[in-house]
Amino acid sequence: MPETKLQEIVYAVLMTFFMVLAMEFYNTGLRMGGMTNEGFFMAFSEMRIMVPVCFVMGYFFMDRIAPKIAFKMVTPGEDKEIFCVIVRAAVTVCLMCPVMSFWATLIFKQPGVQFLAVWLETIVINFPMALCWQVFFCGPLVRFLFRTIFKGQLEKQAVELQE
C-alpha cells in the first residue's frame, strides 16, 4: 500500500505503535493477573523501550522478508485482495512474534539460565493475541488511518497508474 519512503515510514510507525500498545497491555495484564489503572501506566512505560525495538526489527528487517515469503503463497492482482492481506499479516506475525518475544524476554523477564524455556513460552502466549490483533483490529485500523492521512497522494498515485 505505501508507495513512497515517507509513506513506508508513516505506515511502519502506525503499525508499530498500535501493535506494541496492544501487546504491552496484554502482557502487563497477564503479569499482573488482570489489567488495572497502574497496569496502563506500566504498559505505557514499557512502550518507550519496545516501540523503537519493534520499529527497527520490523522496518529494517522483517518488512523486507515478509512480502517475499507471503507472495510465494499468494499473488497480488490474481488472488483476492483479502487473502493477500491476511497472508501478509500472518507471515509478518510469524516473523515478528518470536523476535519481539525474544527482546521482551531479555529486557523484562530476567530468565537467567531458563532463557530458552521462557522465550518459547512467551512466543506461545503472545502468538494468538498478536495474530488476532493484527488481522482483525490493528491491520484494518492502520490501513484506514494510512488511507485517511495520504488520501490525496493515494488518489493521485492511482490516477498516474491508470495513465
Image (spheres, rainbow, N blue to C red):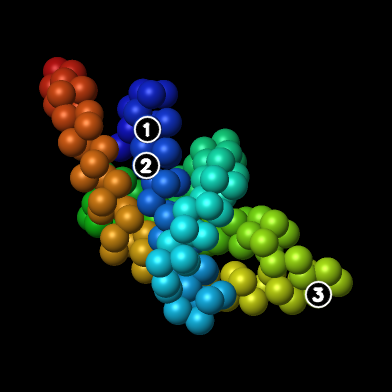
The x and y percentages for residue 67 are 46, 45
Label 3 secondary element: helix
Give neighbour class at mark 3: few <14, some 14-19, many 20+ (Cα, 10 Å): few
Residue under the image location 34 percent in, 49 percent down = 75
Quadrant where the N terminus is found in the figure: top left
Give neighbour class at mark 2: few <14, some 14-19, many 20+ (Cα, 10 Å): some
Residue under the image location 37 percent in, 32 percent down = 10
Answer with the quarter of the image where residue 149 lies.
top left
The residues tagged by marks 2 and 1 sit, at their Cα atoms, a distance apart of 6 Å
Q: Along the line of sight, which residue is nearer the eye, 107 or 69? A: 107
Type of residue at label 1?
A: Val
C-beta proximity under 8 Å, tags 2 and 1: yes
Residue under the image location 59 percent in, 56 percent down = 100
Residue 10's disc number = 1
Residue under the image location 26 percent in, 38 percent down = 146
* In the displayed structure image, the side of residue 118 where residue 128 appears, left or right: left
Residue 28's disc number = none
Label 2 secondary element: helix
